[in-house]
Image (cartoon, grey):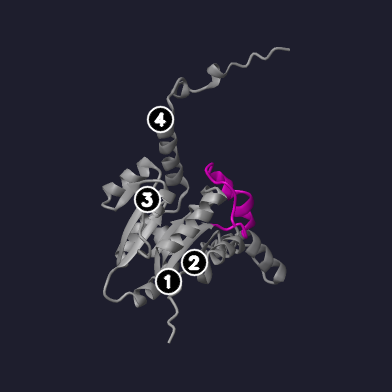
């Protein structure tokens, strides 16, 4: 039997004989629309950023005469960068999406179109108080994530912090379903795995922050260990962050 399937018939006209450049631009626009639809509102994101206030205050407590510096990798639409600026940071960011970069620059943010590893490689040793990558790690090959964590340690100031935030597969609904809404996600990462990765590269004072727990209104009603376990497995924190510090050098008397 000979198939009558003709790819040219079912492909949208917009994809026929398109160049890789125009296709990349179309996919970039698609991803922006996807994020605008599925990402939390700015007010919800700003509420979740409050989790990082203890970290921000601790960094402010160390810095005395000079301002705080931050590098945001994969800055996206720039909400986190804006929040950092409001909290006294001189923030710069990089992203690989031309549309995202233009949107950030139009808002007055210091953002460059650049590969994140190249951006880190170009920085001087001990130049940032904070390096962040929020919802970036799950998009990367492990070899790239490994180099990111290693190189970030080099460019952090003593007592500086690296923050990696990612979807939380401890929540089974996230790990088995919602994680895969985004076609650019590779695989879920666990708190234990990311904590080990940072510790392996010399980060200390490791902390795991669990974020964005579902509201009580969607949880199972009732009491008892079985209900609590089910609610934790299916309605627990949807994201988590691992925070690691580059310790101050030890003084020898």
**Residue 214 percent coordinates (x, y):** 55, 61
Q: Which residue is mark 2?
A: 243
* CB atoms of marks 3 and 4 within 8 Å: no
Q: Which residue is mark 3?
A: 94
Q: Which residue is mark 1?
A: 55
* CB atoms of marks 1 and 2 within 8 Å: yes
Residue 80 visible in the picture:
no
Nearer-N-terminus badge (3/4): 4
Cα distance between the residues tagged 1 and 4: 41 Å
Nearer-N-terminus badge (2/3): 3
Q: Which-is-in-front pick, marks 3 and 1?
A: 3
| Disc 4 element | helix
Q: Is residue 173 magenta?
A: yes
- Which residue is drawn at the image coordinates 52% and 56% (left, top)? 166
Magenta-colored span: 167-189
Q: Which residue is mark 4?
A: 21
């Amino acid at each position: 039997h000979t198939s009558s399937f003709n790819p040219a018939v079912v492909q949208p006209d917009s994809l026929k004989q398109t160049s890789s450049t125009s296709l990349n631009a179309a996919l970039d626009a698609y991803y922006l629309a996807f994020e605008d639809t599925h990402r939390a509102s700015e007010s919800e994101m700003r509420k979740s950023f409050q989790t990082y206030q203890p970290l921000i205050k601790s960094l402010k407590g160390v810095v005395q005469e000079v301002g705080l510096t931050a590098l945001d990798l994969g800055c996206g639409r720039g909400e986190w960068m804006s929040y950092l600026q409001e909290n006294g940071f001189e923030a710069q960011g990089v992203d690989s999406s031309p549309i995202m970069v233009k949107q950030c620059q139009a808002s007055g943010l210091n953002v460059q179109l650049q590969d994140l590893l190249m951006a880190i490689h170009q920085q001087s040793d001990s130049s940032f108080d904070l390096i962040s990558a929020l919802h970036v790690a799950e998009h990367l090959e492990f070899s790239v994530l490994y180099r990111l964590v290693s190189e970030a340690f080099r460019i952090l100031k003593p007592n500086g912090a690296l923050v990696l935030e990612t979807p939380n597969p401890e929540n089974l609904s996230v790990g088995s379903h919602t994680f895969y809404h985004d076609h650019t996600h590779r695989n879920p990462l666990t708190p234990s795995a990311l904590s080990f990765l940072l510790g392996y590269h010399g980060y200390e004072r490791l902390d795991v922050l669990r974020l964005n727990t579902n509201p009580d209104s969607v949880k199972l009603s009732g009491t008892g260990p079985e209900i609590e376990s089910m609610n934790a497995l299916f309605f627990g924190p949807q994201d988590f962050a691992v925070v690691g510090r580059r310790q101050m050098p030890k003084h020898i008397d």
